[in-house]
Structures are given as C-alpha cells and as structure tokens.
Image (cartoon, helix red, strand yellow):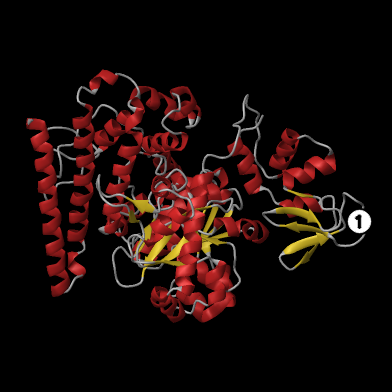
Amino acid sequence: MIADEVVEQVQDAADIVAIVSEHVKLKRVGGSWRGPCPFHSGKGDNFSVLPGKGFRCFVCGETGSVFTFVQKHLGMDFVEAVKLVGEKSGIVVEEVQRRKEGPDPRTPLWEVVGATLEYFERMLWEDDEGQTARTYLAQRGITREVADRFHLGYAPKAIGALRRHLEVLGFDIARQIEAGVQIIREPGDEPRPRFRGRLMFPIHDPRGNAVGFGGRSIDGAEPKYLNSSESPIFHKGQLLYNLHAARHPIRKAERVLVVEGYFDVVRTVAAGIEEVVAPLGTALTIEQAQLMRRYSNNVFLLYDSDQAGLKATFRSGDVLLHEGAAVRVVSLPEGDDPDTFVAKQGAAGLEHELRKAVDVFDRKLQLLERGGWFADLHKARKAIDRLLPTIRAAVDPLTRDLYLSRAAQVSQVDRETLAREAAAMPDPIAPPPPSFGEPMDPGPREEGRPIGRTRGRPTVRVGADAERMLLRAMLLFRGRLNDITTRLDRIESEALDAGLSDLNGGEAVTFRDATLREIHSALVDAGADVGIEQLAEAIPEPMVPALEELTANAEEFVNLETIVEDNLITLEIRWRDELRTKLWEGRAELDTAGFAALTQQRDRLKREIMTLQARRGKRAVG
C-alpha cells in the first residue's frame, strides 16, 4: 500500500489537465477544460476537467479524481495509478506495509474551522458590527467580489458569540479549542475567541482545507496581524497563504511570486496575476520553500524595499537556493509594496517590473557596490562575509559556480579562496543540532549582556533546556500532552499579542529548536496514545536518535509538577526579556510620547518577569 501522506502529496502536485490531455483532446471553456468523453466514446464536449479537482462527464456520469481517470482509462489498480501520476509529477512513490484505515482524524477540526469561516463571512456582510470592516475594505479598494473570492470575514468582539454559534452546530468547546478558534488563557478561565474585532483572512492547506486564520487589526489594536495558534491542523511554518488556489496557476506560468502580506496577495490576484503566495507573517521556512518547489523552480521575491524587507529578501533567497530554486528579486519603487503598486499600475505595471527582476545574488552585489563596500580592504572583507552565506546556500553546482565567479570578479579575490571560505562555513540554513545536556537557563540576562551568555559557563541558547524538559514530560507522561501544549499555545499567544512577532524576525516563541518542534508537532498530530515506534516513523530519520534520548531515564522526573511549571515559567520569562530588549533597540526612532510609552511597557514587562521569577523561586525553596 501507499502511505496516505504520499497519496495526498501526489494529488496536490498532479496536473490533471496535462495528464488527461495525453488521452483526450481538451479545450479551455471558462475555468474548466472540455472534450469528448473517453469512457462512452462521446463526440461532443461533454467531458469536463476542473484543474485541481477532477473530471466529470455530463452524459454518462463518470466522475472522479486524477487517480480515478488513470485507473479507469488505463486499466490500472489504485497503487499503479498513484505511481504513474507520481512519476509524471516528479514524486517518487514507494509502497509501505500498511495504510491507515477510516476517515482522516483531522476532519473534525477542518469542520470547525470551515464553520467558523462561514460565520466570519456572514458577520462581515450581514451584521451591523461588520460595517467597520466593510468600510475598511472599501477604503483599500477591495470589492465585494474580490473579498468573496478570498472568503474574507469579520470576527465580532463579543466573547461568547462564536462559541454559541458553533455549539448550536454541534461543535463542543473542547473541539473548538483543539481547532484553535477558542483559547483558555488560565485554568478555570472562560474560553475566549482567538480573534476579536479583526478582519479575517482564512488560511488553507495545499488541498484546500481551511485550517486557520490571519486576523488584521482595523482599530489600531496590536499586534497588527495575528495568526491562529499552532494546532493539529495549523502549522504556520508549513503553510503558504493562497497556495491552494495558486498551485495550478504556478504550474501554468512556470513561476511563483512571493509577497509579504495578505493584502499583497489579494491585490495581485485580483489584478489577474494568480501565481502568488505569502508566508504567514514569519521568516520563510525550509518547509515553505519545499512546498513552492513542488510546483515551480522559478521564484520571484517581491518584498518591501526598506531595510527589513531587504533582510527578509536575502534570508528567503538563501532558503530557496538551499532547496534548489532559481531566485530573482523584484525591486519596486521606493515606498511601494505589491498592494500599493498594483493598485496604481495594475498587472501590466507589475509584469514590467517582473521582466526587470535580477538574480538574488546579483541584487546583493548591486547593493554592496552602490554602498561602496568594495572601496577599501576593511569594508571589502565585510562585504565578502555577506556574500558567502548565499554562495554556501546554493545547492545547484552550476549556480554556485556562477556566484563564485561573479564574487571573484567584483571583489578581486581569488575564486579558489572564495570557494574554500564558502565550503568551510557552516550551512546557513540547516538548523543547529539539538543540545541535550545544558543546565536550565537561570532567567533573564542582565541589560546589555548577549542572549545565552552567562558568567562562568559557555554560551547556551536561552530556554533550550526548558524546551527539552517540557517535550520529555509530554513524551513520558502522555496524560500531560494536552495541558502542556495548551499552556505553550497560551505563552505563544501572549507573546504575539504583546507584539513580539513584529520584532523577533519570525523566530518561534516556544520550540526554537527545529528538532524539538518537529517531534512535538508529530506527537500532537498522532495523539497521546501513539507508540514511540510509530512516532519514530512519523519524523525524519535523522531526528530518531534525539527522540530516543528524550524518552530515556523517566526517573529524572522526581517532581513532575514542579519541573513542568518551572520550565513553562522559564519560557514566559524568555519572551518578555527578549521583548524588553527589542523595544529598547528601537528607541532612537521614537518621539517623546513614543519613548514614554516604550518605557512604561518595558517597566511593566520587568515587573511581570520579577513576579514570574518569584513564583519559580518559591517553588524551588518549597
């Protein structure tokens, strides 16, 4: 049999129009493709193929997916059909011994999010409270037709409205919390909606299931954008906004455009350029780059042209190069983003800028040359240091060779020397290996002391041991899985609500270590009853030794409750301490009133840190 996730991956990647066209002469009619039915030897165009969906004959009634077509037309069984479609889609399909039976366990959560999506849509267009959001959309030039295309909605401010609506539909509060549409901040608190008073952008997985939301503040509340918290169906680092709708346009155009925000996507698609996606407010991840590479090798980055945008551009470029993509950068006029530019210049204007796009490495060289970085030896050394990570990230040998030649030409440094330097540096993309022997972090650092550096011992990552101990607790004591995960979600939610997401470059709030994050995600997906052997099969093979180490020596947990609580407090302290530092770094840009507000916020965070330290200290003494 073939694993379910492989079947899904092949179906997501398959171009049903191209596959059917090998056997049926099709022509485009609106959003579908028509031709004579191959099953009843029809003559008219009664056989319809819908990209991303399936086929249907309006005469004989034959209908199904791309696999059904191959099975029926070529006389194959299901496994043979999946293998053939996988081969045509560039995916290697291997058989496994068993296949999961029964309905997908994620279906109940998809149903909750889908019902919430419909509720938000109705609130936007039919409820008086939605008038503020309707006015906001009108001011941004978003028509009802465009809003409906993206299923935009509005989350009302009333705390119990969504909960009562979903309960009437049969979704109990536990299911709503698991789906991420309700949260509980403290044990015993009333469940509250994750989103209130926000314009809502539904987020779908590649197959089109609604899995979460992005909420845009329209009344000045912070943060400006808030995403769903992590759940069994929502992992923001593994999703791209609009990919479910852009998959086939990407294949057809043989390119994918990457923008920063939801409105950038909406505006660009509305103008007629549909092959556009956006990360979910975070730095581009390897998983997101891999998703794009399923559909096209040609990636165009259209980020803001300010310093933050340039930093995101080059970081994303390195990630994409690491996955073998060809990456080009589009430089829009200063002060414009795709939303504002397309609103003024339309699709024709954007296509003009796309034709002027330059390779990401050439763009980096342009900026360094314009800034005079190669004018003297000291600055030239720093310029080379900025180029080496991109050279190192390029996995395609020819691309890397071209980058080395260009860098040698511009810097006048011997090409072989540059090649040795690039080869010697660590992989700039691959996550660091987990460290499992570090003592627990003692708390926030002194002002000005680098994160993770403490007197008298080597540098360690703040909170690394807390992450490890919490994951060990969930693995060894499965009854604690749900409540610890809920607490971690609450910590993340509080950090995002406080504005950390806008300042920390998209770094994870809780599980910073990629290995721990992957194992935790697999554990939550599989549920508390999964065996270690089954869990090992669900994670990448290189991570299995880490899983084995995490599940050893349960006797270390002499006082489980104290260990769990203390380590959760450590993570609560960490984000507050980081936010205080990040806020202080931005003080130079503030006026007097802004500086006063910043000081108050930092003082409040410091008081919260001291309270948390006291809680942990009392527990240690007791």
Q: Nearer the viewer, residue 457 or 284?
A: 284
- Check the image and report above or below for 99 versus 381: above
Which quarter of the figure has residue 174? top left
- Check the image and report above or below for 376 versus 563: below
Q: Is residue 585 left or right of residue 195?
A: left
Percent across and percent down for residue 372 are 34, 64
Q: Is residue 50 left or right of residue 418?
A: right
Q: Is residue 17 left or right of residue 325?
A: right
Number of marks drawn:
1
Percent across and percent down for residue 326 are 55, 53
Q: Residue at point 23% right, 33% down?
A: 564
- Check the image and report above or below for 97 versus 36: above
Disc 1 marks a residue whose amino acid type is Gly
Reading the image, the residue beneath label 1 is 42
Percent across and percent down for residue 209 are 55, 52
Q: Nearer the viewer, residue 20 or 347?
A: 20
Which quarter of the figure has residue 364? bottom left
